[in-house]
Amino acid sequence: MSRTLFTVGPVYVAPDTLESMNKPMITHRSKEYKELHADIVEKIKKTLDTDMEVFLVAGSATAFLEGVIRNGVREKSLGITNGSFGNRSIEIGELNGKTVEKVQVEWGKAMKPADIEGKVTKDIEMVHWVSNESSTGVFSDSVALANAVREQNPDALMMVDAVTSAYAMDIKVKEMDVDAVVFGTQKALALPPGLAILLCSERLLEKAKTVPNRGFYTDLLKIKKQSDNNYALTTPPVSIMYGLDYQLDKALREGMSARYERHQKMADMVRAWADKNMEGIFPEKGYQSNSIGVINKGALDFDAFHSKLKARGYEISNGYGDIKEKTFRIGHLGDTTPEMVADLLSVMDEIMEE
Amino acid sequence: MSRTLFTVGPVYVAPDTLESMNKPMITHRSKEYKELHADIVEKIKKTLDTDMEVFLVAGSATAFLEGVIRNGVREKSLGITNGSFGNRSIEIGELNGKTVEKVQVEWGKAMKPADIEGKVTKDIEMVHWVSNESSTGVFSDSVALANAVREQNPDALMMVDAVTSAYAMDIKVKEMDVDAVVFGTQKALALPPGLAILLCSERLLEKAKTVPNRGFYTDLLKIKKQSDNNYALTTPPVSIMYGLDYQLDKALREGMSARYERHQKMADMVRAWADKNMEGIFPEKGYQSNSIGVINKGALDFDAFHSKLKARGYEISNGYGDIKEKTFRIGHLGDTTPEMVADLLSVMDEIMEE
């Protein structure tokens, strides 16, 4: 029943990675834990070239998306969206009692500075968006967006959901200079799900001091206090952290530029296949994701196609949200290689020819 | 550096359990995931003899403690506490903007019906307490407490933190008849941390419909909707779930009565050792935990003692909270056996004689 996953996440986890998690438990108040925590934080800073605080919490990335909004927004935020996950961030704000102004960008199009022109008014405390929209396969230019926010309202905090871009594409953390970058372990880091990661600015921590009802589980000030000693606030998922430490070493050995190039190569292969066999790639040219290919399926019976693919040991993802019916998706995140993508595409070719 | 853990949690995880988590990843929208989720829910219901809803979320148990308060309390709750973790639940309520009336019971004493006499007034929407207080080693009679709440205010919801009692001592879920029972994977289930589990009543779900700002991550109504289809709301920690399914089979094979007796036996051994070698057990007689022994250390230099113990491959826990200086703790949860406890105690004897 085991299949190689080319899904949007959770993704393929290599056997050596699974093995790396197989170590005896340690308590999260031990010296060994502190060393593990410190190593992870240092390696994340190094791989993403950032001096921001690195916070960890047991949970999916959504836990931190909710936490950042609760810590950074007293009343009002601005959510930019071009797909399902952008919509979800807006919903998270609303369900936490915040007023969220919404900028709706057409599905398949990137979010651009022009879209928020005049929208970042003085009462907007935070602007949030998704770096790489998993439903549409669009990678927006977050550096350009962040600059546009800053020009209009230098006091507005910014949160970027980097769940399917961090570690797959260069998100330019320093250039973006935002206040929160959120992602998890089960996408481009090629680990099982279970740990959420936040890059956090000093500015967000300062703002948090003034915001009531921040909650407990993801209170950034409480997390910061523990994190300064390389401890977690609540019980951390130690086995996932063993794996994360291992995967970060892998990333350091490969080198981040080589890693980003590998993802570019896989994306090019999928795009070429989509142009040849389907009706091309859904997202706007120039803003296509290198971690997820969203393909216009035309008249293809995806379920029948996918059944045959699964029978041969491969799994991809169907469309999502508003474009569920007209697209399907191929994820090439984490430890996936161009050779693995070539295998997948040749099997897909065989099925097409049947 | 590997040591056998007799800590309060995370606890010793057996090699076969670690191995059971080593399976290839599946996506959380697949048929295989649904089967895994359904199996876990069914086995939890069976082992704890309950018909309550079983909800799962990636995170430590604290995530659900916070979630239940956000879902079930509009303005005011009553927190009963006899230690650090009872205090924490009260803090969680307060940090979520609720007013929490506090009943402080002396550390080391059990919480009893008399302590809350006249306190569960009509404006109290939820009463919450800790079944087995990890800081003091006190196991309170939650059935008696629940009955006392019901007599005073039948509309008050009840939440029980069962983090170190569920699966180690019979918490009598049906007799308690409360609205939320919260625990996690890293204590008596002998797994790595990473998954929070909630037994949830219909009454709590009904109340949630009337409570604003429930948030997203642990919104019980959203979780219920997905759970009805054996899906998780947000990405679940699949590898931990493989392990949980495996550990629940182990519990079913052992039989829950045998499991509870095993814990009783280990507790008796630790108590006898404490009476002979130290100043006995800290908690009140008749309410002592069977999962955690909290020992009055008298003049013992615990750090020196613990260093020697660790050097021989065993780890226990120091005191916690207000009684940190006068106690230390031995955890005997999960898959720990009387034979393992006997080994530990004989090594402790050796160190005492040095």
Image: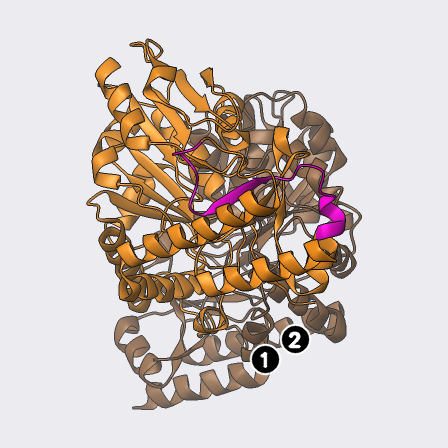
Chain colours: A brown, B orange
Asked if residue A74 is positioned above or below residue A340 in the image, the reply reads: above
Q: Would you call the spot at circle 1 few (<14 residues within 10 Å), some (14-19), or many (20 or more)?
A: some
Drawn side of residue B262 relative to residue B283, left or right: left
Q: Residue A337 carries which label?
A: 1
Tag 2 residue = A262
| Real-space Cα separation, disc 1 to disc 2, in angstroms | 7 Å
Residue at point 33%, 90% (across, down): A353
- The chain letter under disc 1 is A
Identify which residue, A8 or B94, lies in the foreground: B94
1 and 2 marks on the same chain = yes
- Quarter holding the N terminus of chain A is bottom left
**Residue B99's x, y, as percent?**
46, 15
Quadrant in which residue A14 is drawn? bottom right
Drawn side of residue B32 relative to residue B289, left or right: left
Quadrant in which residue B311 is drawn? bottom right
Q: Would you call the spot at circle 2 few (<14 residues within 10 Å), some (14-19), or many (20 or more)?
A: many
Q: What's under tag 2, amino acid-wise?
A: Arg
- Quarter holding the C terminus of chain A is bottom left
Drawn side of residue B71 relative to residue A70, left or right: left
Residue range corresponding to the magenta coloring: B285-305
Q: What's under tag 1, amino acid-wise?
A: Thr
Question: Would residue B297 be counted in the magenta stretch?
Answer: yes
Question: Would residue B288 be counted in the magenta stretch?
Answer: yes
**Residue A286's x, y, as percent?**
61, 61
- The chain letter under disc 2 is A
User: Is the C-beta separation of discs 1 and 2 under 8 Å?
Assistant: yes
**Residue A87's x, y, as percent?**
45, 42
Disc 2 secondary structure class: helix
